[in-house]
Image: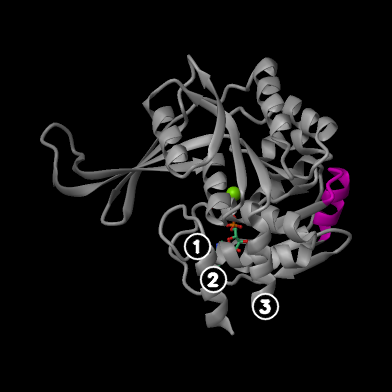
């Protein structure tokens, strides 16, 4: 990519309006050390040194749009009426991201706690609710989405209940702007007829299985695209980059030089791909841009976002 193509995209991002709907997750990290074994049972004793919270799932997609300096962002989803929900909302307020969230009385906010000693994950403790959103609640979110009048909608599905077949129907029938989906295989029926889907290779293979498609993604991806009536399919291939699937397939090799942490790379892809496609209406430019952003994200620790200066710097050092 050349520098002025990127500068052009970044400039246009400021006038975009993008909505994200999906499952919010609170990622909690507990850092500490293990120095002795418990006298009570043959288990290590973990001593807490510090705790950290990050916004994950759909909230991380919104944060990625924000760091790309997309002009207006609205995040829609569900949290519980609990301290985790409050922490998520506080992170969003601090980052000046607008949100409209259903607050459930009985379901908890999805939380993933990682216990980490010496950069080594010892344990992950999940607390989550997977109950599907009620039709009334879906309509409620959808009304707010329509009023926002976005240029594009991102569906960030972590299979925790916000994305349902009913929501898919509303998006297909009642929204004119393109919808970009980061999918979970078991919900594939909800995405039929939407604009673009960005599975990773494993998710792609699982969805292909539901259609009894056999063979490599190179053979099956164009067929899956037709069967699901998608305009475009972008399959992310981890260290191999990504593949753009329309009538044929075009491959874009990965751009990362050093890889520290691949968590959240998928969130960076959907955010940067959506913004760049809406700004350029050019799939080649958009796939190159998304690959570049994801390459920067994986070279950082933790789920991370990518800033315009970093993108331009990376480009400079690649020339
Ligand atoms: N090891 C890697 N080296 C270089 N680039 C990578 C690597 N892993 C991921 N990427 C970049 O990130 C993009 C998305 O990665 P991947 O296909 O692993 O998505 P994902 O499984 O949805 O990620 P996650 O669910 O962890 O957010 C890739 O298309 C590529 O651009
Ligand atoms: Mg993913």
| Ligand 1 contact, mark 2 (Cβ < 8 Å) | yes
Q: Which residue is mark 1?
A: 298
- Quadrant placement of the N terminus: bottom right
Report the front residue among 184 and 24: 24
Give the answer, above or below, for where 80 lies relative to 61. above
Q: Nearer the viewer, mark 3 or mark 1?
A: 3
The circle drawn on residue 50 is: none
Read off the magenta span.
219-231
> Crowding near pointer 2: few (<14 within 10 Å), some, many (20+)?
many
Q: How is the image coloured?
A: one colour
Badge count: 3
Q: Earlier in the sequence, mark 2 or mark 1?
A: 2
* Mark 2 touches mark 1? (CB < 8 Å): yes
Cα gap from disc 3 to disc 1, whole angstroms: 22 Å
Q: Regarding mark 2 in the picture, which secondary structure is present there?
A: loop
Q: Which residue is mark 2?
A: 256
Report the front residue among 152 and 27: 152
Could you tell me residue 214's position as x and y percent? Answer: 80, 52
The circle drawn on residue 2 is: 3
Cα gap from disc 2 to disc 1, whole angstroms: 7 Å
Magenta stretch secondary structure, dominant: helix
Q: Regarding mark 1 in the picture, which secondary structure is present there?
A: loop
Could you tell me residue 18's position as x and y percent? Answer: 67, 44
In magenta segment, residue 203: no
Could you tell me residue 274's position as x and y percent? Answer: 69, 52
Q: Earlier in the sequence, mark 3 or mark 1?
A: 3
Q: Earlier in the sequence, mark 3 or mark 2?
A: 3
């Amino acid at each position: 990519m050349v520098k002025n193509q990127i500068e052009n995209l970044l400039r246009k991002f400021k006038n975009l309006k993008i909505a994200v709907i999906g499952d919010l997750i609170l990622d909690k990290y507990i850092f500490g050390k293990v120095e002795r074994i418990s006298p009570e049972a043959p288990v290590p004793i973990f001593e807490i040194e510090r705790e950290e919270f990050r916004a994950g799932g759909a909230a991380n997609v919104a944060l990625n749009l924000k760091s790309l300096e997309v002009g207006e962002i609205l995040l829609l989803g569900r949290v519980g009426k609990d301290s985790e929900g409050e922490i998520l909302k506080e992170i969003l307020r601090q980052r000046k991201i607008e949100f409209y969230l259903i607050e459930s009385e009985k379901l908890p906010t999805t939380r993933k706690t990682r216990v980490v000693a010496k950069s080594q994950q010892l344990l992950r403790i999940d607390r989550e609710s997977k109950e599907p959103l009620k039709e009334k609640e879906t309509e409620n979110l959808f009304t707010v989405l329509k009023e926002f009048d976005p240029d594009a909608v991102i569906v960030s599905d972590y299979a925790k209940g916000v994305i349902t077949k009913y929501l898919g129907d509303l998006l297909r029938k009642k929204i004119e702007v393109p919808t970009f989906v980061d999918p979970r295989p078991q919900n594939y029926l909800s995405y039929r007829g939407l604009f673009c889907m960005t599975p990773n290779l494993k998710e792609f293979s699982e969805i292909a299985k539901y259609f009894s498609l056999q063979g490599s993604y190179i053979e099956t991806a164009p067929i899956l695209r037709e069967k699901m009536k998608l305009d475009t399919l972008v399959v992310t291939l981890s260290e191999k980059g990504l593949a753009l699937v329309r009538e044929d397939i075009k491959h874009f090799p990965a751009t990362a030089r050093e890889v520290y942490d691949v968590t959240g790379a998928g969130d960076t892809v959907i955010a940067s791909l959506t913004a760049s496609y809406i700004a350029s209406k050019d799939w080649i430019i958009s796939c190159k841009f998304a690959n570049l952003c994801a390459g920067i994200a994986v070279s950082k620790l933790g789920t991370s976002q990518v800033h315009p200066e970093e993108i331009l710097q990376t480009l400079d050092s690649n020339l």
